[in-house]
């Protein structure tokens, strides 16, 4: 029931799936109650483990409970979206919903043990063709930044095929953390999970995120010994938007290709200088000017690269055998969103936290639920649970 309730598109669909595939006639309400109850038990277990880690002396927090450490330890974080609607909202919640609707952010982290080799030379000095393909970059920019080039400039040729680049690290084991808690609690959960995986003892460690301040707050607080890396894809989305700002695609495309190659090589300062020249040509955006204006696009890219350039030494990261994109967290969020996100899906805070925890558990290759189910009978109190709807 818990597996079906955590994977189907809805509890109603879970009920249908169990009837069709397992010949079990179980109501959606019963599946919902069981899924929420087990999810809450896992949340309580997770919180207890996090607090136990937080109470350790600092040297132990920065140490490893495991004898073996992965060759490369990588932490990635980002946020998803889901709708929250509590039955008895506080006045603060009502006011917030009135202004912003029901959509709220959830936070997701990936902990990846990886294998790679260290190289004296950059194993991939040329930017992959898929990242200088008009079809591909337009699609990426539209998905990540909502930035579109006019349809009449659609490229006629097919999209380049994505291939594994030389020196790209290989994922060995993935585990996942997901919550509706604030970024400070999420940071503790992520740090506790990394400690349990023995990441502190890894010879090479990386923390990857986009440019949001919350990501780097978590890095400074809990992962400052990890190499900080700005997701390369987010960086070139800003570069692409600035390169074609105020230009037709055929005019801006060669400029983007040159700038993207410089970013790939870690020569971010060259792009910053080129953007400053372009900003002088266009002028500074005026107060309240549209974010879609060419001047605003260039100013945004310039500000972004200047703020993030210390985390954009991509040639160095490739020589170290570290990943340079947050593709794993992006795909993980998409997997979680299949269950919890939808215009017709509304969750209570407790129901959302329970489902997010179970979704993270099932996506974790460390298989935390196997241990949970094995040990659960020993924690049973004999008390039955009666719960209302999620």
Image (cartoon, rainbow, N blue to C red):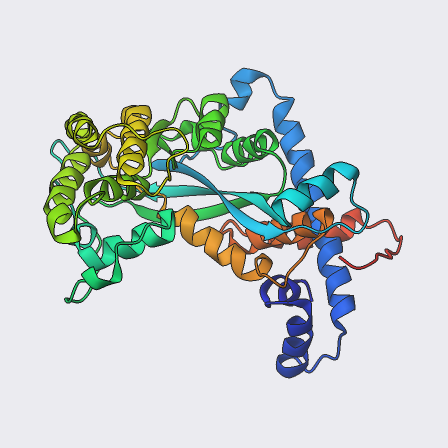
Residue 101 higher or lower than 48, as above or below: below
Residue 217 seen anywhere in this rendered image of the structure:
yes
* Left or right of 266 in this view: 80: right
| Quarter in which the N terminus is drawn | bottom right
Residue at point 60% right, 43% down? 179
Q: Which quadrant of the structure image shows residue 210?
A: top left
216 or 370, which is in the foreground? 216
Q: Position of residue 241 (x, y in %)?
A: 26, 43
* Left or right of 155 in this view: 360: right
Residue 322 seen anywhere in this rendered image of the structure:
no
Q: Position of residue 44 (x, y in %)?
A: 72, 41
Q: Which quadrant of the structure image shows residue 112?
A: top left
Residue at point 67% right, 62% down? 2
Residue 229 higher or lower than 247, as above or below: above
Q: Position of residue 294 (x, y in %)?
A: 26, 40
Residue 151 higher or lower than 190, as above or below: below
Q: As drawn, which residue projects farthest toward the right?
A: 383
360 or 95, which is in the foreground? 95
| Quarter in which the C terminus is drawn | bottom right
């Amino acid at each position: 029931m818990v597996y079906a309730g955590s994977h189907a598109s809805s509890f109603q669909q879970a009920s249908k799936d169990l009837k069709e595939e397992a010949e079990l006639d179980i109501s959606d309400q019963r599946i919902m109650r069981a899924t929420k109850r087990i999810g809450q038990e896992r949340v309580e277990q997770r919180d207890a483990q996090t607090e136990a880690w937080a109470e350790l002396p600092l040297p132990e927090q920065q140490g490893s409970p495991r004898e073996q450490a992965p060759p490369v330890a990588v932490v990635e974080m980002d946020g998803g979206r889901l709708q929250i609607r509590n039955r008895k909202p506080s006045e603060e919640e009502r006011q917030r919903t009135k202004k912003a609707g029901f959509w709220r952010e959830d936070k997701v982290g990936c902990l990846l043990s990886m294998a790679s080799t260290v190289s004296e030379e950059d194993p991939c000095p040329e930017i992959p063709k898929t990242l200088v393909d008009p079809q591909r970059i337009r699609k990426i920019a539209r998905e990540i930044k909502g930035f579109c080039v006019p349809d009449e400039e659609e490229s006629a040729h097919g999209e380049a095929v994505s291939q594994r680049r030389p020196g790209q690290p290989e994922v060995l084991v993935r585990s996942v953390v997901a919550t509706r808690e604030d970024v400070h609690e999420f940071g503790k959960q992520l740090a506790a999970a990394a400690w349990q995986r023995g990441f502190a003892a890894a010879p090479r460690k990386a923390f990857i995120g986009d440019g949001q301040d919350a990501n780097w707050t978590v890095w400074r607080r809990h992962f400052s010994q990890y190499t900080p890396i700005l997701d390369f894809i987010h960086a070139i989305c800003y570069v692409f938007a600035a390169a074609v700002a105020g230009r037709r695609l055929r005019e801006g495309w060669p400029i983007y290709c040159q700038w993207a190659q410089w970013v790939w090589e870690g020569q971010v300062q060259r792009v910053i200088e080129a953007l400053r020249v372009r900003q002088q040509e266009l002028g500074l955006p005026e107060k309240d000017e549209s974010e879609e204006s060419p001047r605003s696009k260039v100013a945004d890219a310039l500000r972004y690269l200047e703020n993030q350039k210390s985390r954009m030494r991509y040639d160095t990261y490739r020589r170290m055998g570290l990943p340079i994109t947050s593709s794993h967290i992006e795909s993980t969020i998409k997997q979680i969103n299949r269950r919890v996100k939808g215009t017709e899906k509304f969750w209570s805070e407790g129901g959302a936290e329970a489902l997010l925890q179970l979704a993270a558990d099932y996506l974790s290759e460390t298989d935390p639920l196997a241990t949970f189910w094995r040990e659960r009978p020993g924690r049973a109190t004999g008390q039955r649970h009666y719960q209302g709807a999620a």
